[in-house]
Amino acid sequence: MAARPVRWRDGTVLILDQRRLPAEERYVEAREPQEVAEAIRAMAVRGAPLIGIAAAYGVALAALRSRARSRAALLEDVEAAGRLLAGARPTAVNLSWAVGRVVGAVRAALPVGLEAMRGAAVAEARAIAREDEEACLAIARLGAELVPAGARILTHCNTGSLATGGCGTAQGVILAAHREGKVAHVWVDETRPLLQGARLTAWELRRLGVPMTLVADTAAGSLMARGLVDLVVVGADRVAANGDVANKVGTYQLAVLARHHRIPFLVAAPVSTLDPATPRGDAIVIEERDPGEVLAPLGVRFAPEGAAAANPAFDVTPARLVTAIVTDRGVAGPPYRSSLRALLEGRAGGATGWPGAAGQGAGAAAAGPGAAAGPPSERAATAEVGR
Ligand code: MRU
């Protein structure tokens, strides 16, 4: 796999420009927080955990570049950069979460002095990156336990090392299951309009040697109807307190199709993607991007001049369509309000009942009272009956 897509080097941030992939692997160097914010907005860097990491380094840049001579003035500069970075994209909660952590670390170091404030910013951003790498490993390990042998898995968008600080979320699950010999095949949605599936997931899975086939987003229903999909695994940009999941547009229709065909629908995300402050999915701000991305995907125009287009970048999948949410702290199942709260509070809620649950380690035992029960196929059937 390529080197990390976001790196801190000698007081600058190196960002792999994902808009150029897979044709070209080119890093851009950001020296100012504004440049990081622009890279996030323009999606040179993307994926919920990774934009959090990039923004965290962006705040660190603000601390280093500030010419403030007083601690209060330095904090003001850092807070202003934090607002800019957090506002670069609205849907992924990881962005404001990571910015809040770094700004908080700078504020906490204020009594010590200017250099301590700068050092705290860099250290906190590095810690966020390191923790996300560990979170990905935990998600991969826990999620792989839920993958049945010989699974044909369908996934959407890109959730791998190009979207995170580690091996990925949904894609980390797929990779871990593949390494355990459980993955027969992966169906990769191309993911219109920016083609993260076609350009990024296909690129990553091929490099990793995972058997995959790219399909048009619109092929998912017929694949399911033909019995060619055993499991859907996707990532998330924000999970509301009740378990509603915001993710790349197209995820919701997959969840509806999966329910219709009694196929388990798994969401994989670190706890940094959980947003207990947002009660339900309808309160999540969905990013509306430039209609030009739909009219002329990747710059190739095929809509007639004058045609109108809408470009919501995400959608919300209601919790009732989600079989389980795999986090780095454990697997949550319905009812999500209590199971997610238990994960966030670090409460152990007992074994999940999923296959392999008995083998889950300490970090995996936090699933709450509503923890998922039964293997994927059983759970789907139970959910179907209970509709
Ligand atoms: O618009 P993007 O490419 O940033 O959207 C990415 C997704 O929707 C991913 O599924 C999500 O961020 C999870 S990434 C681990």
Image: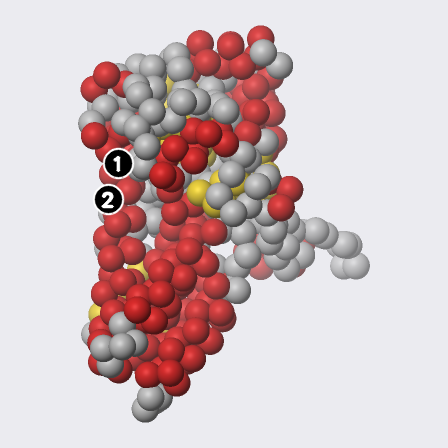
Q: Is residue 85 above or below residue 363?
A: below
Q: Is residue 2 left or right of residue 259?
A: left
Question: Which x, y percent locates residue 196?
Answer: 47, 46
Residue lying furthest front in this view?
A: 111
**Secondary-structure class at tag 1:** helix
Q: Residue at x 34, y 49 (%)?
A: 164
Q: Is residue 57 left or right of residue 256?
A: left
Question: Which x, y percent locates residue 145?
Answer: 29, 22
Q: Residue at x 39, y 85 (%)?
A: 73
**Secondary-structure class at tag 2:** helix
Quadrant in which residue 293 is drawn: bottom right
Whether residue 376 is visible here, answered yes or no, is: yes
> Which disc is residue 348 wearing?
none
Question: Which x, y percent locates residue 352?
Answer: 34, 19
Q: Residue at x 54, y 14 (%)?
A: 383
Quadrant in which residue 327 is drawn: top left
Residue receiving disc 2: 134
Near-viewer residue (338 or 124): 338
Question: Which x, y percent locates residue 360?
Answer: 23, 24
Residue receiving disc 1: 138
